[in-house]
Amino acid sequence: MTRLLETNLLTIPRIGLGTWQLRGPEATAAVESAIGLGYRHIDTAAMYGNEEAVGAGIAGSGVKREEIFLTTKIWWTELAPDALRASAEASLKKLATPYADLILIHWPAKGMDLAASLTALAKLRTDGLARAIGVSNFPPGLLKQALDLRIAPIAALQVECHVYLWQEKLAALCRAHDLAMTAYSPIAKAQVNDDPVMQTIAKRHGATPVQVAIAWLMAQPNLVAIPKSGRAQGQKENLAAASLALTAEDLAAIAALPKGRRLVNPDFAPDWAA
């Protein structure tokens, strides 16, 4: 079983299964495998095109739906209130569940009516379609604006975060407002495997560089990580990283790595410095 992060608005397992690029039977098998190994947090999105497969994996796991923390996300082209509602309902139908534990705005849209989108998002929660709501890929200024509007009880922020990209302004906002900060691409697309610093730390602990990368995130307050793995062995190793205790020397060595390497930056991305 995974460790839990508890905030005022949600209780979420600190290590979840990311499912981006897992499709069809592969996604279903990966979700069933992960749950069988003890995962209780599954992350998907409308844009991933795998919600039906993820839902089938949850149903096939034999574990009760209420024991699984399920996150899905609404794409940036669907943020007008009616479209947002329709997208959420379509996602739940594909996932074969009456509710998601967390529904996020996947990306902000340029020129979006933030207040209107947050109002629609908040209604998902009050109507029982989402246990909690939040945002993803919001830069610091936009996250602060969303929080200051006090329209929706934002419980979580999901952003790219790993040993090469630490977003302190966002992390500080999450700590100040008691938000869960979920790190996607937490192993930097496996680039940590080729890093001499990460290799040295891993060798000292009898672990892998990937496990060290996840353990580093687990050492940060309010952090949740959703590494993707379709293989049972990889899933098992990722889950075990929660038990890896890094030393002060390890943490200092990782802190010294450059922290500005962004790996996910599509053409519709916001101004990250805003």
Image (spheres, rainbow, N blue to C red):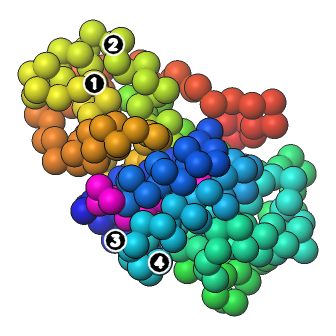
User: Which residue does the image show at 67% across and 36% down from the upper left?
Assistant: 272
Q: Report if residue 66 lies within the magenta region.
A: no
Residue 84 in view, yes or no: yes
Q: How far is mark 2 from mark 4, CA to CA?
A: 39 Å
Q: Which residue is mark 3?
A: 6
**Mark 1 and mark 2 residues within 8 Å of each other at the beta carbon:** yes
Task: Say above or below: 143 vs 84.
Answer: above
Q: Which residue is mark 4?
A: 65
Q: How far is mark 1 from mark 4, CA to CA?
A: 33 Å
- Which mark sits nearer the N-terminus, 3 or 4? 3
- Residue depth check, mark 2 versus mark 3: number of the one nearer the observer: 2
Residue interval drawn in magenta = 36-44
Image check: 269 left or right of 226?
A: right
Expressed as whole percent of the image width and height from the top left, the position of residue 193 reads: 34, 18
Q: Which residue is mark 1?
A: 209
Image check: 210 left or right of 82?
A: left
Secondary structure of the residue carrying numbered label 4:
helix
Expressed as whole percent of the image width and height from the top left, the position of residue 189 reads: 49, 26
User: Which residue does the image show at 57% across and 26% down from the upper left?
Assistant: 262
Q: Amino acid at mark 3?
A: Glu
Quarter of image, res 274:
top right
Q: Which residue is mark 2?
A: 195
**Mark 2 and mark 3 residues within 8 Å of each other at the beta carbon:** no
- Residue depth check, mark 1 versus mark 4: number of the one nearer the observer: 4
Q: Residues within 10 Å of mark 3 (few under 14, many from 20)?
A: some
Q: Image quadrant for the N terminus?
A: bottom left
Expressed as whole percent of the image width and height from the top left, the position of residue 6 reads: 34, 71
Secondary structure of the residue carrying numbered label 2:
loop
Task: Say above or below: 203 vs 99.
Answer: above
- Residue depth check, mark 2 versus mark 4: number of the one nearer the observer: 4
